[in-house]
Image (cartoon, grey):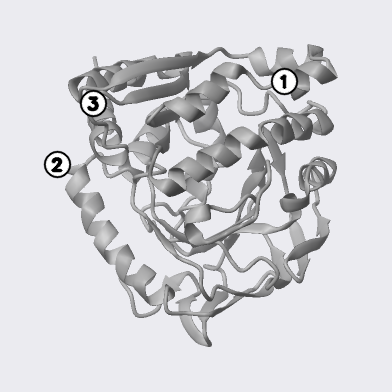
Amino acid sequence: MKDPRLEKLAQVLVHYSTAVKPGELVAIGSSVPAEPLIRELWREVIKAGGHPHLRLGLSGLSEIFFECASDEQLDFVSPLAKYEIETFDKRIGVGAPENTRAMTNVDPAKQARVTKAHKPIFDRSMERTAKGEYSWVATMYPTNASAQDAEMSLAEFEDFVFGAGLLDRDDPVAAWKEISAKQQKIVDYLNTGKKVHLEAANGTDLTFNVEGRKWINCDGRINFPDGEIYTGPVEDSINGTVAFSFPGIMGGREVIGIRMRYEKGRVVEATAQKGEEFMLKMLDQDEGARRMGEFAIGVNYGIQQFVRNTLFDEKIGGTIHIAVGAGYPETGSVNKSGLHWDMVCDLRPGGRLSVDGKPLMENGKLVGFEI
């Protein structure tokens, strides 16, 4: 029996998140476990008048690649990938992992090399998105592997995923538009600020400048589910220390106990309790990888549990997250890198986020605003 929530999800992704129009080229990227959602997306893109193109992955191919690829193959970028990023109008990406730890033993230097090779594709994606020429959305299809990471049964994880996307509502789009209006009030306030100060009970004490930068309202049009507000700090203004509360997930690897110290915008010291070698390889892949590309505030208070999936974890209401690496040009960020790695700091156990000396978030709760 078909889950009606999948139909709703496809409708939201096609008609709201990406707003597919007649004649547009739409890439759908996913893997076999997400077949039920892929079918619904295909249906909705066609109903919208678009031209769907499926990019389907198979389990185990990445592991084979990193095991067998030569240096030349690690550096190779498919001309089809270049064509897609230059030609397509929309992209819908659906994560559906069968084994979330499959990449754990891959040589981190190889992963960093591939990420660096694909930097021009990543840069072009950011550039076209900032210009409004291209839009994309990333979402999640519930699998047993992800449910295990979240320490839930599959049925519980499905309820978590679809609930976070408000797909249990009669009209999810109307619900997201209401959230968007509430978040915009915070965005408007932040766009008048200059100095940000982050403090947390884990030893975090970080300051940076956002004068002249733009804060962005994330309301389900790039990630789904959504619920964050982000910007790109002035690159050389970041100073202090940040300790991340949850493991950093990147490329199928988990790095635990990450701590970073910034001086004049650059990470000058980075340590981790587990996965430090991998983390350092990622940070050393190019000049921009040790700089902050994004600072964001998680305001989805419907998500309260860490599930080892960045799509959800970075939205947890009462947290902030920082991305080392590439910044989003639409914020004013000029930092470029093949890396964009989000890491979460939880303010709920004790922390404060202040703008120009006034608290915006205290112990995970917004001050003066409601979501």
Q: What number is the disc on residue 7? A: 3
Spatial CA distance of label 2 from label 1 is 46 Å
Which of the two residues, 370 or 269, is positioned nearer the viewer here?
269
What residue type is disc 1 on?
Phe
Measured as percent of width and height from the top left, residue 246 is found at 63, 52
> Would you say 119 lies left or right of 159 here?
right
Spatial CA distance of label 3 from label 1 is 37 Å
Which of the two residues, 54 or 363, is positioned nearer the viewer here?
54
Which of the two residues, 268 or 300, is positioned nearer the viewer here?
268
Measured as percent of width and height from the top left, residue 135 is found at 39, 38
- Total numbered labels placed on residues in the image: 3
Does residue 95 show up?
no
Measured as percent of width and height from the top left, residue 365 is found at 43, 72
> Would you say 323 lies left or right of 266 here?
left
Rendered-image quadrant of the C terminus: bottom left
Foreground mark, 3 or 1, reads 1
| Residue at image location 48% in from the left, 14% down from the top | 56
Q: What number is the disc on residue 170? A: 2
> Would you say 257 lies left or right of 321 here?
right
Q: Residues within 10 Å of mark 1 (few under 14, many from 20)?
A: few
| Residue at image location 55% in from the left, 38% down from the top | 124
> Would you say 198 lies left or right of 6 here?
right
Q: What number is the disc on residue 76? A: 1
